[in-house]
Amino acid sequence: MRLSELQKTSIKQHARDIFGEDAQVMVFGSRLNDATKGGDLDLLIVTNHNVPHPAMQAARLATRISRMMSGRKVDVLIDSPTLQQQPIHQIARQTGVAL
């Protein structure tokens, strides 16, 4: 996984600040491949409670992490019982790695 320990810790803290202390963070996509360079950061946020403003909260998290990572593009998916699931959610859960 192409993230430093400091980045992992910061990402988890930002996610918990926005989505609550129970939020779990998974990384999926190209960042898991140590042999490649560049690429965006794909995150799946898993929470067991209602997310009242998912688009706004995902954008807030993506912005914070992007700033922390010098403008790197960040995509955020949210897995919550009250939100509709798409095929990408299943892919993220199957291939992702928890931080």
Image (tube, rainbow, N blue to C red):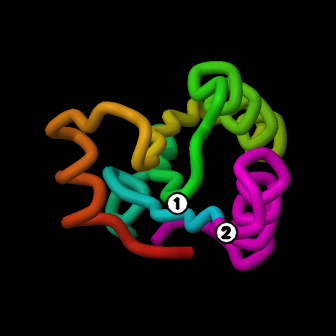
Mark found first going from the N terminus, 2 or 1: 2
Asked whether, in this view, residue 33 is left or right of residue 16, the answer is left
Q: Which residue corresponds to the image point at 80% horizontal and 73% vertical from the top-left?
A: 6
Q: 86 or 49, which lies in front?
A: 49
Helix, strand or loop for disc 1:
loop
- Mark 2–mark 1 CB contact (< 8 Å): yes
Q: Main secondary structure of the magenta part?
A: helix
Q: 91 or 32, which lies in front?
A: 91
Q: What residue lies at 58% left-to-right and 21% top-to-bottom?
A: 55
Please tell me whether residue 30 belongs to the stretch shown in magenta. Answer: no
Is 99 on the left-hand or right-hand side of 86? right
20 horizontally vs 24: left or right: right
Sort mark 1 into few (<14), some (14-19) or many (20+) by Cα contacts within 10 Å: few
Q: Position of residue 65 (x, y in %)?
A: 74, 43
Say which quarter of the image contains residue 85. top left
Which residue is labeled 1 in the image?
Answer: 48
Classify residue 54 by image quadrant: top right
Residue under label 2, please give it: 22
Between the C-alphas of marks 2 and 1, the distance is 8 Å
Q: Amino acid at mark 2?
A: Asp
Q: Position of residue 79 (x, y in %)?
A: 42, 48
Q: Is residue 37 visible?
A: yes
* Magenta highlight range: 1-22
User: Is the residue 3 above or below the residue 82 in the image?
Assistant: below
Amino acid type, mark 1 = Asn
Q: In the image, is 27 to the left or to the right of 22? A: left
Residue at image x 45%, y 51%?
44
Q: Residues within 10 Å of mark 2 (few under 14, many from 20)?
A: few
Q: Is residue 86 above or below residue 37?
A: above
